Amino acid sequence: MAATLPFAENEIRLLTALLRARVRFMVVGLSAATLQGAPVVTQDVDLWFEKLGDLKISRALQTVGAAYVPPSAINPPMLAGAGAELFDIVLRMDGLGTFAKELKNCIEISLGGQKLKLLSLERVLASKIAANRAKDRLTIPVLRDALATTSAINSPNAKKRPKKKRIGSTN
Amino acid sequence: MKQRKSNRPTAASIKRWTRRLMARMQSVLAANPQADADNVRHTLILLEQPPLERLQKSLIRGRHTTICRK
């Protein structure tokens, strides 16, 4: 039997609902890094919202059967309901500027006809260096090498290759 | 009868892909000698896949690692 994909229809629906409602947020952490090609593993998708109390968030989540659970004495702020299990809310990003400042340098990818914003690989690395937890220290060399690789192949001096369908490419 | 073209990679196309991958890896390593060759190779391979596919793989492996640690 085929295994269920962790990031499936419900998760995509949840993110596109937030994007359609014009909620200002971005994907951060290792999930943002992996979306940009870094060979790292992660267990969740961290979301950084500009205004966590924004009513647009709750309204958008309601449309897909999910909800925003505000922080209390016993729980941090979280998303609950359909497709919310995978997502974590990030309250603080070590070593980074304000949300608005980081948004200017974010990377965009297509998701359900919308543009999903990602914290750039360079800034993910900066945040991991600043956080400097044991688990961050394990990923720093990998992120550094991934950044060197993406920078090298995107540099204007990189050799242009002929456009050919490659193995493993579904685009 | 018209024959359907197979999408399956041939030995020749795999060889070409490997050669191209190695050339790109060498060029990245030449510019970044401190970089780890495996990290560079894995990044180059992942960059050939769509972003959501990269995330799926990362999440699947991340969860598998957790299960193995338990």
Image (cartoon, coloured by chain):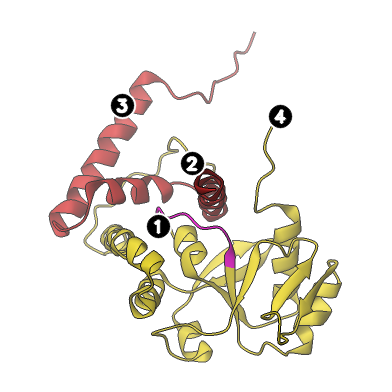
Query: Do the dots labelled 3 and 4 sit on one chain?
Result: no
Which residue position is annotated with label 4?
Answer: A1
Query: Do the dots labelled 3 and 1 sit on one chain?
Result: no
Q: Position of residue A59 (x, y in %)?
A: 83, 80
Chain drawn yellow, letter? A
| A151 up-or-down from B29: above or below | below
Which residue position is annotated with label 2?
Answer: A169
Label 2 Cα crowd, 10 Å radius (few <14 / some 14-19 / many 20+): few
Which residue position is annotated with label 1?
Answer: A38
The chain carrying label 4 is A
Q: How far apart in space, not on screen, are marks 3 and 4 (Cα)?
A: 32 Å
Q: Quadrant of residue A68?
A: bottom right
Query: Do the dots labelled 2 and 1 sit on one chain?
Result: yes
Q: Position of residue A117 (x, y in %)?
A: 56, 73
Query: SS at mark 3?
Result: helix
Query: Do the dots labelled 4 and 1 sit on one chain?
Result: yes
